[in-house]
Image (cartoon, rainbow, N blue to C red):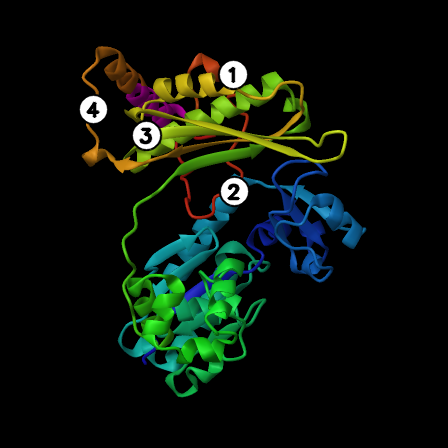
Amino acid sequence: MPLRHMFIDMNSFFASCEQQERPELRGRPVIVVPTDAETTACIAASYEAKRFGIKTGTPVWEARRLCRGVISVVANHKRYVVMHNRIVAAVRRVVAVETVMSIDEMSCRLMADERKPDVATGMAGTIKREIYALAGDQMHCSIGIGPNTMLAKVASDMQKPNGLTVLPDAEMPAALYRLQLTDFPGVGPRMERRLKLHGIFTVEQLCKAPAKALSEVWGSKVHGERWFRLLRGEDVADTPTRRQTVSHSHVLPPSLRTDDGAYGVIMRLVHKAAARLRKIGYWCGAISLGVSFYGDERGESHWWEEGTRVPRCHDTPALVSAAQKLWALRPRGRTPFKVGTVLSDLVPARSATPSLFDEDRQGEDISAAMDDVNAEFGASVVYLGAMFGMRDAAPTRIAFTQIPDFDKRVN
């Protein structure tokens, strides 16, 4: 079971970026939030804040209760992407980056002598130093080295912050036994319950389970055999997947928690989703809108969602028109807090049949022209009237798996 993969996971990435940029935040409990409101939730927490029990998803008001001195910082998406690019450049000084998994994670394939434990650990130390040199001394990472990408990722989580874990052949699989089932990527609370229903309560039992048993757990022979092989250190290729949805959501700032404000932002989100759909080469057959409203007199919040099918399309005018009709169905007299849109029933563009009607073709032509202008002169330079006044609303808050470029004149 050779050491074929190295996984780099930046520690508390968004909070660390803020501490790197602002020295006064170093050593202090910091939370990063999508908008400046007590009712929103943390999207990141520094290790100083984590010691108080604050984590991703903790409401801001609860974070302040857990730690009276916690500092709230509104996320700066562009700063994180710039830092991400520096980190990727630093890693590439030492080893080729095979896959950027997300804005704070990447995997590298080791070759020849790089697979020797002493060489691999030496490279990991060099990577940490290069990151400090290019990105700053607050940018710590945990590195895992293992026989496949999944086990290397698991190893990167075994020592945090700033750790280094190697899973050599001689220590496998016993080195995994002290972990929890949910320490494996893809095993959340629901899958953990399924495993336990099938008599698998520990990682040791998971590692020793036959392929047939794992196939029953996952409800798929393909997935069961894949897990069986991954747990034994085989380098299994990823199974190609087809995108299911394109979605965008946004917590409204206090100034836009009105009917008109929510409408403008949701139309901005439809514009973004349509542009994204075209960029990745898909067409959709359905659109839905959702709005979260503040609590009623009993303090219970309310979520409204409505969807509709649309003729297969990827143009902004058609999707805006469908969204406007859905918006007319919303509940009235309530205060909106969060809005979102989802484009679904996707098919690759190569499998879609363009409309024969001139009106539909005009919409496609308008969308293509908008994309060209916005790509050249900056995001949302041109847009449909439905989002007038909301060009800067609902900015991209955090890029997790999609890392945009900020070249040219992009906002």
Q: Is residue 1 visible?
A: yes
The amino acid at mark 2 is: Ile
Identify the mark nearer the N-term, 3 or 4.
3
Mark closer to the chain start, 2 or 3: 3
- Asked whether 376 falls inside the magenta stretch, the response is yes
Q: CA distance from mark 4 to mark 1?
A: 28 Å
From mark 4 to mark 2, how far is it between C-alphas?
A: 33 Å
Which residue is the site of mark 1? 328
Say which mark, if any, is on residue 398. 2
- Crowding at dot 3, Cα within 10 Å, few <14 / some 14-19 / many 20+, comes out as some
- The image position of residue 171, as x and y in percent, is 43, 86
For residue 39, the mark is none
The label number, if any, that marks residue 285 in the structure image: 3
* Spot occupied by residue 252 in the image (x, y as percentages of width and height): 61, 29
C-alpha separation, residue under disc 3 versus residue under disc 4: 13 Å
Q: Along the polypeptide, which appears first: circle 4 or circle 1?
A: 1
* Residue at mark 1 to residue at mark 3: CA–CA distance: 20 Å
Q: How many tags in the picture?
A: 4
Q: Amino acid at mark 3?
A: Gly
Q: Position of residue 55 (x, y in %)?
A: 64, 55
> Tag 1: residue type?
Ala
Task: Quote the CA–CA distance across marks 2 and 3.
Answer: 27 Å
Q: Which residues are magenta?
A: 367-378
Distance of mark 2 from mark 1, alpha carbons? 30 Å
Q: Nearer the viewer, residue 220 or 73?
A: 220
- Residue 167, compared with residue 381, is above or below; it is below
Q: Is 204 inside the magenta-drawn segment?
A: no
